[in-house]
Image (cartoon, grey):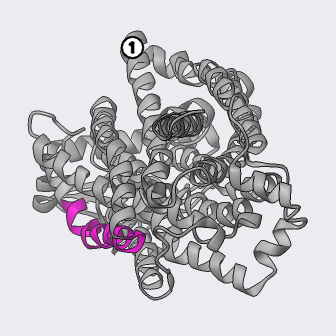
């Protein structure tokens, strides 16, 4: 008979295998999802070559959001599977679906090869990815939480949270290595496929590791007692007490999660590269540093929540981000591209036009024409990350005013696709020449950047995101009973991350395009974070250390 010490060591070894297998599979799914977000500028050129650059980028960001939009559907589908048939089977299917979809993206024809069919196929595979990821996170977090001791649940599930950073890190490393190996021209032509195709190897490893796991003890107990939910959807969303928990989870935790985390790790990429002109390679290296630092912080803040409670740690992260969104974004701009900030101060840009001809340039599917002179002028400036002020012109025509220089903008309403595209390209060149002559840099110069300050500012947002995300899995698991935990927990999580977080980059970028102010898109994150701070303070209950059978 094994001694108490041997039993304890066996228990630790089993828990370690559970954490490694669950986290590795989740990291692989995040890898699949993140390579698309990180390659949005390349995707916009490869699959949306028929659009002008600004519309193409918005379409690529919207397609990134499409995968998130379908995550709640995946949460419902696999939530029911997990609550009725078991946790293990559900997340074996999700990892297989995600891996197959990602691999196939690497084989898709481009716009040049298949026209709009390429975009249609890409959208379909993004939907498959979204559905798969919708079932993945809840299964992995619940599986680990239902094995972990009550007083160590935050630290144990913190590894599931850190899997996001491992997935993002793997995606970035593969992208960087591929870029450097084949060169930027070849990468834009065909090298972008390699990160997607590499997923086949990761898929095989993940499936093998997860296939060796047993069912969660809490679900096995329910099955033995004949207490498995017959209608998880009705129990989770049809009963008043349960739906209240779902709403509190969404408004009290997930609104901020979608805003803070996706601002830090996704919108910041767009902000640095598109708005501030930071070269792609430099942006990737900054993100790698952020990701490396974040990995242990998830586990640390999960551990801390076991000691002092989930609420104070998560609310602390929310408040830190809320206070810093606007001032820190301005500081980041000054650190990353001081020449751009100085040029904006010395030579503000104006668009003199007939306001009646200006459109609200929010086009998530990238189908709008935007051919008026006003729209062409604004699109060109936004694509260069330039703030501008719109004024009414004296003669009703459109001009971009750069200092004392006036750039007349032609109207393209009567032009067809190729001619309109050519006009927009010429307009962009003309405006760019005047901007450069006025001291506006074509891109951020690393020699002038304050990299130390830039990294420190980015890491402050990393602390905010990890303080919120680290304890989150344990907090959500502890909010719902075992019978419907997979369904009830997964849905608010994926509405928050899928809709609030997934649509953050495209919405914030488009708000900047509408207003002419690259900082105005921050209001999206501010509003959703503020909602969660208020709801968390008054309605989220402390659950640290609570036994899962007491829920």
| Residue 386 appears in the picture as rendered | no
| Residue drawn at (48%, 83%) of the image | 535
Q: Is residue 492 magenta?
A: no
Residue 536, image quadrant: bottom left
| Residue drawn at (69%, 27%) of the image | 207
Q: Is residue 504 left or right of residue 47?
A: left
Q: Is residue 328 magenta?
A: yes
Tell me the crowding category of disc 1: few under 14, some 14 to 19, or many 20 or more residues within 10 angstroms, Cα based: few
Q: Is residue 528 above or below residue 15?
A: below
| Residue drawn at (9%, 33%) of the image | 447
- Residue at the front extreme of this rendering: 1
Quadrant containing the N terminus in the rendered view: top right
Which structural element holds mark 1?
A: loop
| Residue 162 appears in the picture as rendered | yes
Residue 140, image x and y in percent? Answer: 62, 46
- The residue under label 1 is 183
Q: Is residue 251 above or below residue 329?
A: below
Residue 444, image x and y in percent? Answer: 21, 39
Report the front residue among 19 and 334: 19
Q: Is residue 164 above or below residue 519?
A: above
Residue 30, image quadrant: top right
Q: Is residue 502 left or right of residue 348?
A: right
Q: Is residue 53 above or below residue 534?
A: above
Name the chief secondary structure element in magenta: helix
- Magenta region: 309-330
| Residue drawn at (55%, 59%) of the image | 497
- Residue at the top extreme of this rendering: 181
Report the front residue among 199 and 520: 199
């Amino acid at each position: 008979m094994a001694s108490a010490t041997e039993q304890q060591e066996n228990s630790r070894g089993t828990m370690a295998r559970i954490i490694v297998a669950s986290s590795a599979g989740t990291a692989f799914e995040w890898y699949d999802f993140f390579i698309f977000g990180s390659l949005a500028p390349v995707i916009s050129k490869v699959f949306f070559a028929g659009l002008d650059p600004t519309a193409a980028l918005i379409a690529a960001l919207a397609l990134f959001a499409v995968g998130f939009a379908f995550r709640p559907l995946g949460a419902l589908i696999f939530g029911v599977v997990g609550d009725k048939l078991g946790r293990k089977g559900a997340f074996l299917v999700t990892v297989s679906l995600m891996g197959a979809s990602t691999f196939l993206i690497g084989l898709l024809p481009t716009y040049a090869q298949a026209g709009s069919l390429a975009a249609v196929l890409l959208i379909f595979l993004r939907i498959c990815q979204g559905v798969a990821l919708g079932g993945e996170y809840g299964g992995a977090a619940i599986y680990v939480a239902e094995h972990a001791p009550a007083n160590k649940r935050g630290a144990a599930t913190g590894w599931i949270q850190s899997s996001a950073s491992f997935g993002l890190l793997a995606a970035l490393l593969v992208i960087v290595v591929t870029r450097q190996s084949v060169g930027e021209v070849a990468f834009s032509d065909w090298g972008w496929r390699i990160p997607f195709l590499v997923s086949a190897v990761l898929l095989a490893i993940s499936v093998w590791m997860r296939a060796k796991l047993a069912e969660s003890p809490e679900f096995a107990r329910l099955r033995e007692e004949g207490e498995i939910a017959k209608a998880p959807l009705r129990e989770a969303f049809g009963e008043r007490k349960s739906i209240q928990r779902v709403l509190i989870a969404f408004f009290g935790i997930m609104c901020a999660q979608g805003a803070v985390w996706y601002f830090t790790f996704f919108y910041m990429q767009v902000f640095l590269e598109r708005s501030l002109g930071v070269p792609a390679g430099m942006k990737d290296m900054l993100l790698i540093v952020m990701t490396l630092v974040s990995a242990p912080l998830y586990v640390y803040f999960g551990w801390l929540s076991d000691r002092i409670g989930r609420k104070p740690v998560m609310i602390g992260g929310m408040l830190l981000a809320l206070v810093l969104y606007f001032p820190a974004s301005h500081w980041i701009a000054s650190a990353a591209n001081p020449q751009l900030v100085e040029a904006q101060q010395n030579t503000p840009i104006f668009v003199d036009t007939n306001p009646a001809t200006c459109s609200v340039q929010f086009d998530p599917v990238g189908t709008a024409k935007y051919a008026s002179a006003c729209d062409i002028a604004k699109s060109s400036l936004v694509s260069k990350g330039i703030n501008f002020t719109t004024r009414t012109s004296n003669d009703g025509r459109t001009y971009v005013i750069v200092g004392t220089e006036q750039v007349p903008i032609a109207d393209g309403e009567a032009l067809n696709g190729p001619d309109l595209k050519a006009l927009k390209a010429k307009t962009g060149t003309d405006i760019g020449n005047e901007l450069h002559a006025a001291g506006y840099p074509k891109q951020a110069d690393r020699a002038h950047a304050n990299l130390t300050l830039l990294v420190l500012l980015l890491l402050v947002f990393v602390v905010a995101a990890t303080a919120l995300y680290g304890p989150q899995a344990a907090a959500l698991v502890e909010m719902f009973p075992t019978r419907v935990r997979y369904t009830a927990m997964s849905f608010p999580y994926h509405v928050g991350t899928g809709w609030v977080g997934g649509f953050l980059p495209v919405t914030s970028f488009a708000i900047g395009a509408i207003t002419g102010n690259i900082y105005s898109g921050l209001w999206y994150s501010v509003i959703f974070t503020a909602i969660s701070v208020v709801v968390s303070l008054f309605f989220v209950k402390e659950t640290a250390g609570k036994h899962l059978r007491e829920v």
